Image: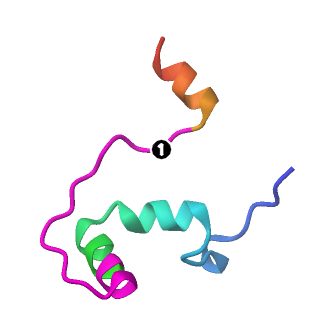
Amino acid sequence: MHKIKPFEDLTFHDDFMFGLVMQDKEICREALECLLGKSIQKIEYTEPSCTYSTARLMKR
């Protein structure tokens, strides 16, 4: 079982925080530009990632 971290202890490396940060297009663009060292003009989102159990529930 996973221990739940306090919100204040989360970093960019935590899956939850990464997903939360990447939901904001401007922050997402700035983070990707920093990581890739390239200018990004437009951000487009595809379907959000989900686990097998979530995907199964979505089909109902």
Residue at image point 47% right, 22% down: 58
Q: Left or right: 19 with respect to 44?
A: right
Residue 51: image quadrant is top right
Residue at image point 38% right, 65% down: 22
Residue 47 percent coordinates (x, y): 35, 40
Q: Is residue 55 magenta?
A: no
Q: Main secondary structure of the magenta part?
A: loop
Given residues 49 and 3, the one toward you in this image is: 49
Residue at image point 56% right, 20% down: 56
Residue 9: image quadrant is bottom right
Numbered marks: total: 1
Where are the magenta residues, as a range? 32-50
Q: Left or right: 23 with respect to 9?
A: left
Mark 1 lies on residue: 49
Residue 20 percent coordinates (x, y): 44, 62
* Amino acid type, label 1: Ser
Which color scheme did the rendering employ for the protein?
rainbow
Residue 13 percent coordinates (x, y): 60, 74
Residue 8 percent coordinates (x, y): 61, 78
